[in-house]
Image (cartoon, rainbow, N blue to C red):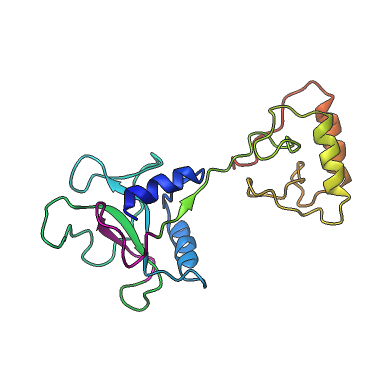
Amino acid sequence: MTWGQCRDSAVALGGYLASILSQEENDFVKQLLNTAPVQVLFCNIGGHERNGENDWQWVSGEPWGYFNWNTGEPNNLCSPPNPGCENIVQMYGHTDPVPPSGTWVDGDSLTPDQAGVGSFVVEYNCDCPHQGDIASRPTGDGVIDVFDVIEEIGIAFSGSPDIQDPNCPKTRGDVDNNGVADVFDVIYLIATAFSGGPIPVNPCVP
């Protein structure tokens, strides 16, 4: 697939081509590309030139600051030469030692990614609008009520109280943030559901 087809496929999957804003994120994606059975040569990520040479942007709209170009990149080198043709970002994957895995190269947005067979990395937003709003997954129904209390009771006494919420970077039932889902979380939700007070904070926001 071309970069544009990968971009559209990522959106169809409910996410977007990955934006990499730090060395930590870059290392995380690099690990994904080097873990069997994936192990691709390189893949498409969400960087692209929007308005001209070296005007790099992320499809997510996040600020462009961190970058990890391979030596000599971006070079806008196409075959045959075509100024402006290499206008998207790809990451080298399973290529150690040369070029270094995790480094970036500018690629041609109109040419299918033959070496990576149209590989791409999808990033998803953390989608958990209210801490404790756990009964209506994945996004909740916007209120904390008796249904959330019932769900919490099931989690806290399930024998697997550390069950992870796939939409949040935390334990699903740990609504009081003490590291475990237990009876205190049930009490916390009961108090919240019938207090008439504010909905607890979004756990996706540090």
What percent of the width, then of the height, locates residue 19? 41, 49
92 sits left or right of 106 in the view = right
Please tell me which residue is depicted at 45% across the width and 48% down the height of the picture: 10
What percent of the width, then of the height, locates residue 103? 34, 65
Please tell me which residue is depicted at 49% across the width and 67% down the height of the picture: 31
**Which sits in the foreground, 144 or 36?**
36
**Above or below — where is 189 with respect to 27?**
above
Rendered image quadrant of residue 69: bottom left
81 sits left or right of 105 in the view = left
Rendered image quadrant of residue 101: bottom left
Which quadrant does the C terminus fall into? top right
**Which sits in the foreground, 45 or 204?**
45
61 sits left or right of 34 in the view = left
**Which sits in the foreground, 111 or 68?**
111
**Above or below — where is 12 with respect to 95?**
above
69 sits left or right of 199 in the view = left
Please tell me which residue is depicted at 53% across the width and 43% down the height of the picture: 125
Instruction: Verify whether residue 115 appears in magenta.
Output: yes
Magenta part of the protein: which range? 101-118
Q: Main secondary structure of the magenta part?
A: loop
What percent of the width, then of the height, locates residue 174? 76, 46
**Above or below — where is 23 with respect to 171?**
below
Which quadrant does the N terminus fall into? bottom left
Number of numbered labels in the structure image = 0
What percent of the width, then of the height, locates residue 7? 38, 47
Please tell me which residue is depicted at 41% across the width and 57% down the height of the picture: 120
What is the residue that sits farthest to the top in this orientation? 196
Instruction: Verify whether residue 160 appears in magenta.
Output: no
